[in-house]
Image (tube, coloured by chain):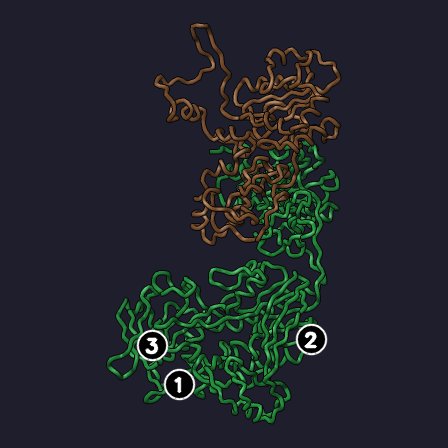
């Protein structure tokens, strides 16, 4: 497309405060000018006081477009620039740089959105033209009050803290270390590996989960830049991006690397407890190794169970076990923090699909443990009078729940989101059963099959071909699991099948597997500490799902893996790598540049009434006790504006959005508007 | 009380005046509250107008030469045509015209009627008031024909205006009433020529910071659980009244009074108007309140707000004429 010179007008009048405003209106190749009469807008705006130039251009973001802005700034001595074009999220930075190249402070620029908010939302040319004029007129009045601002610069301590030693935390730590960053990895449990260690094989490749995990752990612990701390929890954290200080408490492990006869120590322990690793399907000792090949390869003592009887100590001759070991505290200094706190499988409520009432109703996680050759039964399914011959899977347990249909959770909500991993996970397990026991009859009760991932659909195809029977239930009438009075199989699953037009189905089952959803691991303390945004599903919320997918709104804190939402291992690893790249990029800058739109306290007006301290969501305001006034931490302030809006004495103003600027804008917007 | 000065002045003393318009008379009394200082004042100044205290006639003022009065304190807002006429007259006759007290600076209590129409005000005052007996439904008319001829009374304005809405004002002294100590300091500054440059926006005899600056109470950084009215609960003496749930206008109110009300265990009513450069006192206070409610749900917030009786009278008690609301149009 050929660039056409636009119309050009301007009152030539300098505003009384010396503002010489240049207004550039973009055609966006017709995207704007097909609806908005940009020439008329330019003429109208050109009549306004202070507007030295009002012109249009075919593509302002193009090189000639930006060149025009630069040239006019220099030629006409413009000291305020307005670009009316697309959304500021797209090109605000582009034009700020243009303005800066012309030697003008980049914050003496204002971006007006006349595309997404005007031309794209209406076909009414007259209304669009008027709205564009009104919006630009408001910007003209606003820019008269703009003041030059400088970006904030904060130096970054070149070290990372990764919280969580599951697959996401491990991948993030590894990637950071491989980029030459110093990393501390903190895990709450005594052993690394998280949920992946509890899996047998991974979809969609079918590779051994623990092999994959072991490779990552090897890469992490062998790296000289990584310091792994297990059995540790976060006590508190202070500081801001570039300079976080996180205090941790390391629980005593009870055993150390000098312990040689590890199996003897475990065998000698007389105390038993439920083994959470097998989801309650087995028992473990008070001194234990979580799983074969776990890291660290040193047993740990569960102090809630240990009676300090000393039998383990006797068994190993006293070497390598210390029952009197004390917890330690330490402070970790880091420039950034990666949260990789993971998820928990959804625990069905008592009686939900017979769970808790019938022992043969188990969760998918339990089934996976049962299928694991290294699991509690050596890979055998539970026997009654033989291997089960009829297995029923029920999908969407604790996922995609419907208010009014499903029972509310203890938090008062229903789990209305799709847990994303259970469809493929359930079919993966079903196919494994089919491979091992071709005689077993498998029925799959589902709402929708969501094998959405790359290579996942194969599982559904294979399952269909392998004779797995699919029954589609209506989510408003989920299946019921009952005892079977006939006695050939202990359970009965009843529902009506939408695939056969609502035919009632009554399926006897020896084993019912609930494909349960996922919930975020309880990290409410960390949420408070880092002021994390949390979604309605209780998972942590990124700044923007597409544009800033692994960043929290709090600068310097990143998200890795399923703390952010249900993810399979592939996705969790990808997210972890993304978090690592973002963190590494930040650390590599050595200094972080931040927009100057932060709050500032007028010391002459502040009375220290502390209202702002109460409302600041980021703990960015403290009270200077000696002067009795509020002080804003420049690094911590995100520029949300809450304090400025709150301050009853008008003692807080926000750079870029001060009262004069906002009021001038609002007045201009309302000018001539009919008020009720 | 000083003697009447001869009309031409000329004894070298400062000539001061005090006038009342739409006000309660409290401002006149507050000037007397400077106590023994009144004697010092009389030494350097002659009172040439003070209808509340001495017998001056309209014609006396008309006969004064322009700029005759050195300092004129004008209290009360402008409710009717007579008050506007006198305001204009005094502007002409005074070198320095000071809006004195909340009514003159921000409309004060009378300006709360700006939320009503003239018909509504007349209905309340002449028809609906239970203590009235007005069977003929008579209302005051600007012009009335009577057996003595045509009678004229001032026209009633639809709005109470601030003095600065009518004439140019040199200084503002806020407060209902202004506190004597501050006023005396301002008079001394005036006599000594130490007041800042004249500007109708300049408030004197007060400070820029909010009342919290003078308040001795402790902040505990808690959010407000529920609103209470002063008669509904006994306020804890040492603790911030706002945090206790009493709507204390202190944070949004200019200081200068010495936190008088809060020291008497009563919430600040906001009589000194907005602090600093804030324009709209009620909006400032509502903005602050909205952020410190301990309400997790919208319903709870609504419940709490419903407990605020007369929000306009609470948040704009003294500043309706200065507010962005401006009352009923």
Q: Earlier in the sequence, mark 3 or mark 1?
A: 3
Q: Earlier in the sequence, mark 3 or mark 2?
A: 2
Colour seen for chain A? green
Observer-nearest of A189 and A103: A189
Residue closest to the far top = B148
Identify the chain drawn in brown.
B
Mark 1: give few (<14), some (14-19) or many (20+) Cα within 10 Å: some
**Image x and y of residue A467, in percent:** 35, 79
Residue in the image at 44% along x and 73% along y: A424
Give the letter of the chain under mark 3.
A
CA separation in Å, label 1 and label 2:
44 Å
A504 to the left or right of B237? left
* Residue at the spot of label 1: A381
A31 to the left or right of A430? right
Mark 2: give few (<14), some (14-19) or many (20+) Cα within 10 Å: many
* Residue B211 visible, this orientation: yes
* Residue at the spot of label 3: A357
Label 1: element kind = loop
Observer-nearest of A78 and A271: A271
B25 lies above or below A507 = above
Label 3: element kind = loop
Label for residue A225?
Answer: 2
**Image x and y of residue A156, in percent:** 70, 63
Residue in the image at 34% along x and 63% along y: A405
Residue in the image at 46% along x and 71% along y: A421
Give the letter of the chain under mark 1.
A
B194 to the left or right of A538? right
């Amino acid at each position: 497309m050929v660039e056409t010179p636009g119309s050009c007008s301007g009152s030539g009048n300098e505003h009384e405060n010396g503002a010489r405003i240049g207004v550039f209106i973009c055609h966006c190749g017709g995207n704007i000018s097909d609806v908005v009469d940009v020439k008329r807008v330019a003429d109208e705006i050109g009549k306004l006081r202070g507007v030295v130039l009002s012109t249009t251009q075919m593509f302002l973001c193009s090189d000639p477009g930006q060149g025009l802005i630069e040239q006019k700034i220099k030629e006409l001595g413009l000291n305020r620039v307005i670009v009316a074009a697309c959304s500021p999220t797209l090109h605000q930075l582009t034009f700020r740089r243009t303005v800066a190249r012309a030697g003008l402070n980049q914050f003496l620029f204002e971006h007006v959105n006349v595309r997404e908010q005007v031309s794209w939302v209406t076909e009414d040319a007259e209304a669009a033209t008027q709205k564009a004029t009104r919006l630009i007129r408001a910007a003209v009045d606003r820019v008269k009050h703009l003041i030059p601002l400088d970006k904030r610069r904060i130096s970054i301590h070149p070290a990372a803290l990764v919280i969580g030693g599951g697959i996401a935390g491990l991948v993030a730590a590894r990637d950071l270390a491989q980029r030459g960053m110093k990393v501390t990895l903190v895990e709450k449990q005594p052993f690394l590996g998280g949920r992946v260690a509890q899996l047998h094989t991974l979809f969609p490749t079918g590779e051994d989960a623990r092999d994959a995990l072991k490779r990552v752990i090897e890469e992490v612990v062998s790296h000289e830049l990584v310091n792994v701390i297990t059995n540790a929890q976060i006590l508190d954290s202070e500081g801001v991006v570039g300079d976080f200080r996180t205090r941790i408490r390391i629980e005593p492990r009870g055993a150390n690397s000098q312990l040689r006869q590890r199996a003897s120590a475990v065998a000698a322990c007389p105390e038993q407890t439920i083994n959470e690793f097998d989801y309650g399907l087995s028992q473990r000792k008070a001194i234990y190794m979580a799983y074969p090949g776990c890291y660290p390869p040193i047993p740990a003592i569960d102090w809630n169970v240990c009676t300090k009887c000393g039998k383990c100590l006797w068994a190993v001759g006293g070497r390598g076990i210390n029952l009197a070991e004390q917890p330690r505290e330490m402070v970790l200094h880091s420039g950034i923090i990666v949260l990789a706190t993971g998820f928990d499988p959804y625990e069905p409520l008592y009686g939900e699909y017979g769970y808790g009432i019938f022992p043969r109703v188990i969760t998918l996680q339990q089934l996976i443990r049962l299928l694991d050759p290294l699991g509690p039964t050596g890979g055998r399914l539970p026997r009654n009078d033989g291997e089960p011959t009829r297995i029923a899977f029920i999908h969407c347990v604790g996922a995609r729940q419907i208010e009014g249909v499903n029972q509310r959770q203890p938090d008062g909500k229903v789990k209305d989101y799709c847990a994303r991993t259970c469809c493929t996970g359930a079919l993966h397990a079903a196919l494994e059963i089919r491979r091992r026991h071709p005689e077993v009859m498998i029925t799959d009760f589902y709402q929708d099959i969501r094998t959405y991932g790359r290579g996942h659909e194969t599982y559904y195809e294979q399952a269909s071909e392998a004779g797995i029977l699919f029954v589609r239930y209506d989510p408003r009438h989920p299946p019921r699991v009952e005892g079977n009075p006939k006695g050939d199989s202990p359970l009965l699953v009843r529902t009506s099948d939408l695939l056969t037009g609502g035919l009632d189905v009554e399926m006897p089952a020896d084993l019912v597997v609930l494909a349960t959803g996922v919930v975020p691991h309880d990290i409410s303390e960390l949420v408070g500490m880092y002021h994390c945004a949390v979604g309605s599903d209780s998972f942590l919320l990124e700044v923007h799902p597409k544009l800033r997918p692994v960043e929290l709104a709090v600068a310097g804190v990143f998200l890795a893996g399923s703390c952010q939402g249900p993810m399979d291992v592939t996705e969790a690893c990808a997210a972890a790598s993304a978090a690592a790249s973002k963190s590494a990029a930040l650390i590599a800058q050595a200094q972080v540049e931040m927009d100057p739109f932060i709050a500032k306290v007028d010391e002459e007006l502040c009375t220290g009434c502390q209202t702002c301290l109460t409302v600041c969501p980021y703990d960015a305001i403290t009270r200077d006790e000696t002067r009795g006034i509020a002080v804003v931490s420049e690094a911590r302030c995100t520029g949300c504006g809450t304090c400025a809006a709150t301050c009853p004495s008008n003692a807080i103003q926000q750079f870029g959005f001060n009262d004069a600027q906002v009021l001038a804008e609002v007045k201009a917007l309302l000018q001539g508007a009919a008020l009720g | 009380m000083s003697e009447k000065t001869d009309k031409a002045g000329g004894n070298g003393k400062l000539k001061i005046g005090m006038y009342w318009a739409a006000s309660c008379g409290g401002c006149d009394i507050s000037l007397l509250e400077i106590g023994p200082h009144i004697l010092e004042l009389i030494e350097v100044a002659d009172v040439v107008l003070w209808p509340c205290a001495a017998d001056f006639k309209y014609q006396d003022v008309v006969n004064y030469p322009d700029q005759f009065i050195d300092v004129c304190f004008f209290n009360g807002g402008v409710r009717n045509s007579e008050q506007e006429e006198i305001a204009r007259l005094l502007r002409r006759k005074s070198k320095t015209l000071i809006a004195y007290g909340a009514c003159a600076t921000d409309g004060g209590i009378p300006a709360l009627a700006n939320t009503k129409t003239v018909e509504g005000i007349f209905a309340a005052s002449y028809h609906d008031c239970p203590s009235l007996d007005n069977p003929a439904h008579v209302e005051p008319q600007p012009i009335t024909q009577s057996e003595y001829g045509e009678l004229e009374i001032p026209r009633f304005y639809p709005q109470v205006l601030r003095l600065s809405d009518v004439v140019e004002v040199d200084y503002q002294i806020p407060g209902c009433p202004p506190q004597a100590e501050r006023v005396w300091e301002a008079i001394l500054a005036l006599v000594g020529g130490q007041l800042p440059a004249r500007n109708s926006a300049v408030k004197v005899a007060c400070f820029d910071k909010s009342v919290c600056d003078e308040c001795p109470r402790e902040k505990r950084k808690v959010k407000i659980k529920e609103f209470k009215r002063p008669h509904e609960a006994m306020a804890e003496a040492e603790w911030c009244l706002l945090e206790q749930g009493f709507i204390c206008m202190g944070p949004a109110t200019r200081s200068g009074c010495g936190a008088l009300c809060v020291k008497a265990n009563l919430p600040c009513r906001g009589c000194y108007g907005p602090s600093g450069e804030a324009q709209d006192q009620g909006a400032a206070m509502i903005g602050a309140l909205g952020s410190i409610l301990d309400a997790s749900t919208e319903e709870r917030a609504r419940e709490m707000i419903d407990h605020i009786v007369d929000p306009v009278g609470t948040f704009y008690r003294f500043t309706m004429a200065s507010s962005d609301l401006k009352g009923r149009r």
